[in-house]
Image (spheres, rainbow, N blue to C red):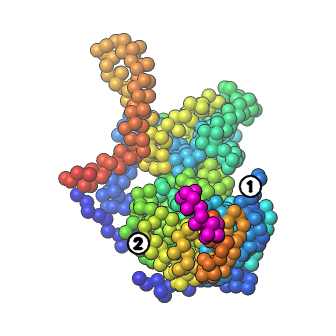
Amino acid sequence: MRIGTVKENYGADAALFDTRVQRGWLVVLAVALVLLPFVSGQYVSYLACLVLINVASTTGLNILTGFTGLVSLGQAAFMGVGAYIVALLEMKVGTPFILNLLLAGLGAALVGMVVGLPSLRVKGLYLAIATIAASVILHFVFANWTEVTGGVSGLTMPPATLFGMELNQPGEVYWIIMPVTVLLLFGAANLFRTRIGRAFIAIRDRDISAEVLGIDLLRYKLLSFAISSFYAGVAGGLWAYFFRVITPESFPLMMSIFFLAAVIVGGMGSILGGILGAIFMTMVPEVLKMLVGVVTPFWPEAVAVLSPVRIMVFGGLIIFFLIFEPEGLAEIWRKIRRFFHLWPFKT
Amino acid sequence: MHTQEVTQDSLAVGQGTTEGNVLSVEGVSLSFGGVHALRDVSFSVKEGSITSVIGPNGAGKTSLFNSISGFYKPSAGEVRFLGESVNGVPAPERARRGMARTFQNIALFKGMTVLDNIKLGRHAHLKTNALDALFYMGRARREEMELRAEIEERIIDFLEIDHIRKQSVAALSYGLQKRVELARALAMQPKILLLDEPVAGMNREETEDMARFILDVREEWGVTVLMVEHDMGLVMDLSDHVVCLNFGQMITQGLPKEVQAHPDVISAYLGSGDVAALRRQFKEGKGA
């Protein structure tokens, strides 16, 4: 049982990971992330990359929707902007991948700010519809600006190079995706230790009193859109390095809904929630697929019979978690931690 | 408490005021369609004073506050703050210039802790930008640490809320929420504090605590206070100057004693100043 944690200065009190146990686990996690591609096969590395890309994008959407309270269904389209920017830079200019990713983020942020302009006037579902309109427009641009985007057939880009080595396999691209995602996550966590993050939450909770405290609503809503789309743009760039073929159909509206679902299932307004939500939404379908694979030797028709069931189970699980814990997976995690902290006493 | 010796730096009063007035409302009128919420209201708030606005429900007190803090645009007249007209100055900028306000129905941010709510008060005076914030280095870290130390040592200690600093505001009692709102307003380094019904819905003990804090804010922080309040006992005990509104018009203003005795004020509250007529009504069974 833990009675409390003692801090000797304000800096220690504001630290992201405040106990020794937490920092210990963080080191374990870091070691695991570094060792993963060495000990696992290509399939696991593939899944890890996919999860990390989704974590980056979900965290971006969480800043906008979970923390600032602005519902957006444009996240996939912003990822598309980032992906196209990376592909074009890699093909036409050949700049290093770090610069490409940064420019992808900035480009998406710019587009995101334009899309965010209506947010001062419209909120909630109306804003969601406005962002759908924006993503349809972006899709149209991707499909029809043939000279730049390659039209419907899209772009095929060369792999990223690191110290002269081409990163082809998932286990290799992982070395770009993992550090960038970790960096983005620390950035998001830091944001909410400062006035910028507090202003976002204030706008979500009560925008009128935020204004009385001197928070310029339009400016901060646009800033939230910009940061969120920056994350989407970088995630889209990572996506491009991972798949290397970008078409207008790579970033459908369904994908935006996927990210929104990840934010809600994981826990709105919690960095950990975004991470858990993205892992859940990416891994559960894979795990269910594996389960079907396990049954197949004993029951040959399993694939045909269970595939539709798999999708239903996935949907059912999402609903179950939302009813069981509306605050999301992050809240479940907090409850588990509290249980162990207080054991052997009841919570 | 060691608040006595740390009062100097936020005492930036006296700059730019005209004739010692921090705020003056000059002929302000406000109408929504055909409804006149305020009609030609004029009064001024002296530096270092506690001024109260009273009046029956619907008299236009909150409309007046909203006009002062920049939510409503008066259809006529002018609000002057620190000697400058603030007509057309948006609410966030008024906040930055030193106008802090609390709300009748508490406007705290429910999803945040007490400490974060108070920190938000300082928002307009901090300089951290998005890039500093993402890396939490240099300016961001320094500003956060300075702010935290100041809030702990001056505000939290002063308002006696150190036991709840890490709690979520949603879980607090009404009286404590009002106190946190006052703390947040103080974090804004205000020149004037607009309190909209600071003791509404409080019990006697909470009211007495709040009265003490309002007096201390004026004495130790040197902040001018303008408040709307229904609790006549509090208004009469604390105020230097009282303004009475009814149906959007100013009936009278002056010392608490004068206003209390003014026949129009009595009739505004009781419906009629004619005591004999009232008595007749009761006898005929039309009263109550």
Q: Nearer the viewer, residue B218 or A130?
A: B218
Tell me the kind of residue under disc 2: Glu
State whether residue B199 is above or below residue B51.
Answer: above
Task: Report the magenta residues as a range.
Answer: B272-288
- For residue A166, side relative to residue B266 (left or right): left
Q: Any magenta on residue B16?
A: no
Q: Nearer the viewer, residue B148 or B177?
A: B177
Residue A305 position by quadrant: top left
Q: How many marks?
A: 2
Residue sitting at x 41%, y 61% = B173
* Image spot of residue A214 (x, y percent): 63, 64
Determine whether the residue tagged by mark 1 lies in a helix, strand or loop. Answer: strand
Q: Residue furthest left?
A: A344
Q: Quadrant of the C terminus of chain B?
A: bottom right
- For residue A38, side relative to residue B25 (left or right): left
Q: Give residue B205's mark.
A: 2
* Image spot of residue A165 (x, y percent): 53, 43
State whether residue A95 is above or below residue B260.
Answer: above
Residue sitting at x 41%, y 82% = B1
Residue holding disc 1: B35
Mark 2 vs mark 1: in front: 1
Residue A250 position by quadrant: top right
Q: Earlier in the sequence, mark 2 or mark 1?
A: 1
State whether residue A270 is above or below residue B176.
Answer: above
Callout 1: few (<14), some (14-19), or many (20+) C-alpha neighbours within 10 Å?
few
Tell me the kind of residue under disc 1: Val
State whether residue A63 is above or below residue A37.
Answer: below
Residue A160 seen in the figure = no
* Distance from the alpha carbon under mark 2 to that under mark 1: 39 Å
